[in-house]
Image (cartoon, rainbow, N blue to C red):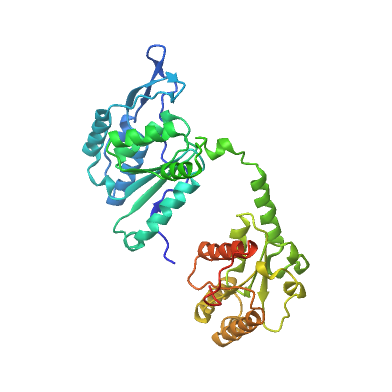
């Protein structure tokens, strides 16, 4: 599976508040003027290689520019604090000055700003899923992309700083803001400054609200739900269980597992188990090895929670060869472990076991990402546990 070549900046996202004057000037009793500036030394053009120059320009852009604006601290009972959006001319002049000082190629890699009042998980995954449709472009660098995640944004002042920086950098803004007034402020600012933007959460929330005939709370998940809630501890318990029951360990506890995965070595049992555990499922995985009997308890547990994994023999051989080399194993082991004939024999043995247990769904994992395999497992698991299983078209999924 091709990996995205979108450049994801490591560490902290571009600083928005690091240049804020710690001593804001009072303008009247209800407003504050914030001064954000770049030292003159950073504005001087420097002669580096073209690559270093681009990095220098990007760093300068992300450090912020001088901003003079008034934020009205008035509020009303309907919309909460009222924020005056800076005049668009301020942003235009900032963009012009940057282009004049540093040239016009700072947009070589286009930016996507991801803004959330929570962890940003929803928005980030939605953006990454969409970027997956442009692998052909990202891989050969035809359309390089930088993604910047701003999480925990719960005040309008910081939100406006981020959106203004997006305007300066020519970035697209994608946001998930549960508070309707925050989402409205983001939408208005983006429209005013001609920023390409998308409210990821709003349309979905509105549709569900209409369907249920109920109003949303408008609270972010971090506010409405304690992070240390029942679901959190359920996930921790599931992860601990899964680690202890990896690779056939403690077969006497298979009955306690929510899901049991069965397959030959290197079919992805352990990473799939870990992924499912992070979603709150207790998972055991049992390896199929020639000459080794499967534990008796495997055939005694509820068959609705047992899933077989199958893979193409040539692909499996390549995976095993790479694994053997990474472990520095001897040539004798390599021949037995990764020789194609031996691999085919193991898979045929697994097929016989699956045929003897027709109630176990067999999932083809070749060229599938862990997330894709997990989605199939959870769909079948839900259908089987709720007795909504559809007639199978074929044995393999």
Front-lying residue, 13 or 114: 114
Residue 256: image quadrant is bottom right
As drawn, the residue found furthest toward the top would be: 28
As rendered, which of 368 and 36 lies closer to the eye?
A: 368
Residue 68 image point, x, y percent = 32, 24
Q: Answer above or below: position of 330 versus 195.
A: below
Q: Is residue 83 above or below residue 255?
A: above
Q: Residue at x 42, y 31 (%)?
A: 181
User: From the viewer's perspective, is residue 99 above or below residue 355?
Assistant: above
Judge left or right: residue 296 versus residue 25.
right
Q: Residue at horizontal 58%, vertical 72%?
A: 267
Rendered position, 11 above or below 41? below
Q: Quadrant of residue 134?
A: bottom left
**Left or right: 279, with 96 as reference point:** right
Residue at the (65%, 42%) spot, across then down: 229
Q: How many marks?
A: 0
* Percent x, y of residue 392: 55, 74
Can residue 316 be seen by looking at this rendering?
yes
């Amino acid at each position: 599976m091709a990996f995205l070549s979108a450049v994801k900046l490591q560490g902290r996202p571009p600083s928005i508040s690091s240049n804020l004057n710690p001593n804001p000037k009072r303008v009247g009793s209800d407003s504050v003027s914030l001064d954000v500036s770049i030292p003159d030394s950073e504005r001087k053009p420097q002669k580096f290689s073209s690559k270093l120059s681009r990095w220098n320009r990007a760093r300068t852009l992300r450090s912020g520019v001088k901003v003079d604006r008034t934020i009205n601290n008035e509020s009303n009972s309907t919309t909460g604090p009222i924020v005056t959006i800076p005049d668009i001319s301020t942003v235009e002049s900032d963009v012009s000055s940057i282009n004049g000082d540093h040239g016009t190629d700072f947009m070589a890699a286009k930016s996507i700003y991801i803004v959330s009042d929570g962890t940003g998980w929803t928005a980030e995954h939605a953006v990454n899923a969409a970027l997956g449709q442009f692998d052909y472009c990202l891989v050969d660098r035809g359309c390089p992309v930088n993604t910047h995640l701003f999480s925990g944004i719960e005040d309008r002042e910081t939100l406006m700083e981020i959106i203004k920086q997006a305007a300066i950098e020519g970035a697209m803004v994608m946001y998930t803001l549960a508070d309707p007034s925050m989402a409205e402020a983001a939408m208005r600012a983006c429209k005013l400054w001609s920023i390409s933007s998308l409210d990821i959460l709003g349309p979905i929330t509105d549709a569900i609200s209409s369907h249920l005939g109920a109003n949303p709370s408008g609270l972010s998940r971090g506010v409405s739900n304690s992070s240390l809630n029942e679901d959190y501890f359920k996930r921790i318990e599931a992860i601990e269980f899964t680690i202890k029951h990896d690779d056939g360990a403690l077969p006497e506890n298979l009955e306690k597992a929510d899901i049991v995965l069965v397959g030959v070595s290197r079919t992805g049992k352990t990473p799939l188990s870990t992924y499912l555990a992070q979603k709150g499922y207790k998972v055991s995985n049992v390896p199929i090895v020639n000459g080794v009997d499967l534990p008796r308890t495997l055939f005694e547990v509820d068959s609705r929670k047992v899933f077989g994994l199958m893979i193409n023999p040539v692909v499996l051989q390549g995976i095993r060869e790479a694994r053997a080399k990474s472990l520095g194993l001897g040539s004798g082991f390599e021949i037995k472990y990764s020789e194609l004939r031996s691999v085919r024999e193991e898979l045929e043995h697994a097929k016989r076991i699956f045929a003897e247990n027709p109630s176990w769904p067999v999932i083809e994992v070749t060229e599938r990402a862990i997330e894709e395999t997990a989605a199939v497992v959870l769909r079948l698991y839900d259908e089987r546990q709720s007795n909504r299983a559809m007639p199978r078209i074929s044995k393999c999924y």
